């Protein structure tokens, strides 16, 4: 029952990785089924249940706990040079609510055949008429709990970032990128999760209390659910990727020995811009649902606009890499993950530019092209950033260093595996293979088989990851000279406490809160530093 | 239907589909240009250490940042203008509609209703169901619910949807139970079938032939088993088909 932000961050990391393994196994089940045409391994309902659970596990219980709960809890107090978050007991409540939510979701998976309506749970398929068991109700309550956990955690983060920063005057600069992106993520969570909660509550009322929010016979509309869900759902995907953006900025600036990312003010504005615009584009998930043509035109334009700040970020990362010494032998393993992120996230973002157009949704809606797009940005964006951040901060957390060749083998196997799995899906989508099919016309066999081969490769990659973790905890190789070059906020002493402590990081840091001092001599530039008095 | 191991749509049966595919190709060209720039930038940046040496202080360049904000914004503007053109071109027909069809999705088959106005100004029509052909042994010699030689599993149906070539028509799509989606990419049409709602799509097939499609919204266990087969026939054949079917009814 610890309220220490480091313990809570560690709990989130363990829970996240466990759920990630569950999600990965579920995806392997699907890839085995799709290896040949024909329903030969899993029945229809089981396949859809596995597919829905894969999505829930990965989104709500792997990426969000690891990047927001784990990294946010660990580094927001350290980077702001303060003792803990603003409300430590609320933090504890968040993590236990998240664990309860995970329990309910596993129950949903294992009762009455599982949850067969997809993670988007569109009524009427998710209504009591077509799914009258408890899995949908369990999933809804699981999302309610996860939502409460996220809202509580986000309020905690926002209060801490606004009020407990050392040098509170300097909001616009000297903040590390991870703080900026977690700030944007928290705002997105606090605003969009209540809308999801509303939609879920209406679904429960429809299912069990004879209301008709989503039934046309009673004056309702199934499209209402789609609006409510996607008004949350689109900010949700930016919630998944924004912390990853922050992690990549940290990794790349360190590996180029630069004190911060190139164009950091532009990067901060781009992150905030992506967060803000993310609220305005939910309709691109509903292009074929029967929206007015002018509405579709608006959502096309708004979605295309988000490509501009995202492109700015990618070019800024490339400029960060410029001027750094990158030699294969001397490169930190986390750098490979970051470089892979920059390349593959760009590919995913470009297919997103294609999908942003309502005119192309008549060809590509609910096809494997969409699956390819979001797996490129998630499975090769968010996941690469999580692995990169894990190895980047692993010496900080444990004081130990993994065997570099094992980490690189894991990276190479993962890189080959995910690309083999998801690149052919672009072709599958273009040749007309729809999503959520457990069997398909035989003409798609070639690319499905290659995608499944990639799935087996990433299974081996996960085995490699276990070997790496096992080896590092067995050998306990200590890190004597930290690789770290001071970041700007460390240099001026206003934050990023993780560079200033002894490795591994102790349980209680910043116990004597540092004071922020500005020396200014006549007309010279002011000199900032922190003093522990 | 596309080639085995194909990587792109192989058939266009309507102007809407051709325009959409042309838009896809234009945007893909721009995307390839951007990706090449990014890859070259990455390679240059990674090898810059050896060529230029450490540039630890290279942390901002306002001109460069302005260029890589404005040039992508301009490319996005280009893409958006092309996209708007295609969206509005495909959204409506200039010509008056000559035939109407109501398509109803069920778990797990489609119902097609045909309607026309005959020479005397009278409205006439009929409907039929369309099931996927089953991968099964035929029960009788003329069993038309199972695959026979030359049929493709999960693409061919027992009673295809017939539309005339060259005649502008209108599809009204709805559903009887859960949300389905009537999708035939070769015609450039994907319309969600939502219960309680009639979604409308214009349709104008430019060549005769057979186009295939699938249900594109998760609708239950047999979501994969409700394919769409559209037979595009000459207008004369279409009229014969309508009169024949009506007489049979």
Image (cartoon, helix red, strand yellow):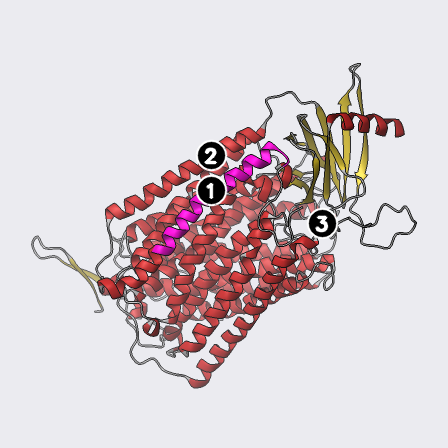
- Which secondary structure lies at badge 3? helix
Between residues B242 and A83, which one lies in front from this camera angle?
Answer: B242
Which of the numbered marks, if any, corresponds to residue B27? Answer: 1
The chain carrying label 1 is B
Residue A523, position as x, y percentages in the image: 8, 52
**Above-or-below relation of A448 to A217:** below
Badge 2 is on which residue? B82
Between residues A183 and A461, which one lies in front from this camera angle?
Answer: A461
Residue A44 is covered by the magenta coloring: no
Residue A431, position as x, y percentages in the image: 61, 48
Query: Is disc 2 on the same chain as disc 1?
Result: yes
- The reply to whether callout 2 and callout 3 are in contact (CB within 8 Å) is no
Between residues A338 and B2, which one lies in front from this camera angle?
Answer: B2
Badge 3 is on which residue? B223
Q: Is residue B182 visible?
A: yes
How many residues crowd around disc 1 within 10 Å: few (fewer than 14), some, or many (20 or more)?
many
- Quote the CA–CA distance across marks 1 and 2: 9 Å
Residue B37 is covered by the magenta coloring: yes
- Which secondary structure lies at badge 1? helix
Q: Of marks 2 and 3, which one's residue comes earlier in the chain?
A: 2
Which of the numbered marks, if any, corresponds to residue A291? Answer: none
- Residue in the image at 40% along x and 48% along y: B34
Numbered range of the magenta stretch: B13-40
Quarter of the figure with residue A408? bottom left
How many residues crowd around disc 2 within 10 Å: few (fewer than 14), some, or many (20 or more)?
some
């Amino acid at each position: 029952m610890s309220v220490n932000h480091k313990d809570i961050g560690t709990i989130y990391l363990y829970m996240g990785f466990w759920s990630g393994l569950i999600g990965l196994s579920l995806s392997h089940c699907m890839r085995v089924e799709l290896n040949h045409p024909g329903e030969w391994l899993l029945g229809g309902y089981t396949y859809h249940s596995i597919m829905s659970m894969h999505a829930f596990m990965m989104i709500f219980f792997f990426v969000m706990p690891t990047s927001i709960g784990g990294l946010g809890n660990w580094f927001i107090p350290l980077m702001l040079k303060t003792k803990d978050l603003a409300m430590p007991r609320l933090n504890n409540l968040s993590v236990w609510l998240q664990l309860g939510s995970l329990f309910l979701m596993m129950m949903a998976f294992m009762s009455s055949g599982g949850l067969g309506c997809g993670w988007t749970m569109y009524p009427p398929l998710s209504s009591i008429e077509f799914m009258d068991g408890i899995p949908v109700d369990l999933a809804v309550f699981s999302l309610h709990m996860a939502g409460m956990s996220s809202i509580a955690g986000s309020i905690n983060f926002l209060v801490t970032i606004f009020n407990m920063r050392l040098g509170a005057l300097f909001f616009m600069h000297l903040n590390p990128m991870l703080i900026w992106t977690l700030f944007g993520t928290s705002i997105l969570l606090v605003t969009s999760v209540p809308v999801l909660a509303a939609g879920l509550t209406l679904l429960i009322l429809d299912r069990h209390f004879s209301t008709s929010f989503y039934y046309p016979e009673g004056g309702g509309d199934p499209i209402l659910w789609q609006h409510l869900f996607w008004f949350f759902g689109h900010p949700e995907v930016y919630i998944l990727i924004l912390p990853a953006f922050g992690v990549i900025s940290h990794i790349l600036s360190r590996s180029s020995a630069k004190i911060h990312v190139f164009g950091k003010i532009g990067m901060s504005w781009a992150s905030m811009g992506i967060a803000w615009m993310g609220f305005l584009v939910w309709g691109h998930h509903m292009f074929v649902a029967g929206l007015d043509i002018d509405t579709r035109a608006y959502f096309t334009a708004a979605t295309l606009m988000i490509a501009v700040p995202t492109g700015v970020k990618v070019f800024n990362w490339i400029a960060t890499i410029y001027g750094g010494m990158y030699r294969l032998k001397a490169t930190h393993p986390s750098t490979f993950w970051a470089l892979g992120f920059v390349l593959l996230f760009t590919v995913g973002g470009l297919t997103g530019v294609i999908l942003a157009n309502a005119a192309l949704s008549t060809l590509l809606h609910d096809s494997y092209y969409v699956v390819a797009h979001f797996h490129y940005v998630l499975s090769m964006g968010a996941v690469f950033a999580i692995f990169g951040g894990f190895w980047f901060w692993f010496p900080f957390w444990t004081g130990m260093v993994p065997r570099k060749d094992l980490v690189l083998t894991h990276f190479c196997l993962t890189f080959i595996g995910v690309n083999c799995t998801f690149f052919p899906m672009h072709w599958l989508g273009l040749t007309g293979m729809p999503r959520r099919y457990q069997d398909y016309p035989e003409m798609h066999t070639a690319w499905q088989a290659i995608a499944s081969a990639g799935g087996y490769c990433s299974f081996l990659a996960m085995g490699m990851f276990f070997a790496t973790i096992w080896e590092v905890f067995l050998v306990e190789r200590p890190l004597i000279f930290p690789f770290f070059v001071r970041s700007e906020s460390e240099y001026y002493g206003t934050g990023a406490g993780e560079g200033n402590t002894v490795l591994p990081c102790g349980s209680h840091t910043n116990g004597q809160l540092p004071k922020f001092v500005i020396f200014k001599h006549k007309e010279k530039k002011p000199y900032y530093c922190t003093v522990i008095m | 239907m596309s080639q085995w191991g194909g990587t792109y749509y192989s058939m266009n049966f309507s102007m809407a589909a051709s325009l959409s595919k042309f838009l896809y190709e234009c945007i893909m060209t721009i995307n390839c240009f951007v990706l090449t720039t990014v890859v070259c930038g990455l390679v240059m940046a990674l090898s810059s250490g050896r060529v230029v040496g450490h540039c630890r202080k290279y942390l901002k360049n306002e001109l460069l940042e302005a260029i890589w904000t404005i040039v992508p914004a301009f490319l996005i503007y280009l893409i958006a203008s092309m996209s708007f053109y295609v969206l509005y071109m495909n959204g409506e027909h200039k010509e008056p509609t000559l035939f109407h069809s109501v398509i109803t999705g069920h778990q797990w088959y489609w119902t097609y209703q045909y309607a026309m106005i005959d020479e005397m100004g009278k409205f006439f029509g009929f409907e039929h169901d369309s099931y996927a052909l089953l991968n099964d042994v035929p029960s009788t010699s003329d069993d038309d619910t199972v695959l026979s030689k030359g049929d493709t599993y999960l693409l061919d149906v027992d009673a295809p949807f017939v539309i005339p070539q060259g005649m502008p028509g209108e599809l009204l799509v709805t559903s009887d139970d859960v949300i389905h989606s009537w999708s035939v990419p070769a015609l450039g049409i994907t319309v969600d079938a939502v219960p309680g709602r009639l979604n409308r799509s214009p349709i104008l097939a430019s060549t005769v032939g057979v186009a295939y499609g699938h249900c594109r919204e998760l609708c239950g266990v047999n979501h994969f088993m409700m394919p769409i087969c559209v037979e595009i026939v000459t207008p004369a054949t279409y009229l014969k088909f309508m009169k024949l079917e009506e007489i049979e009814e």
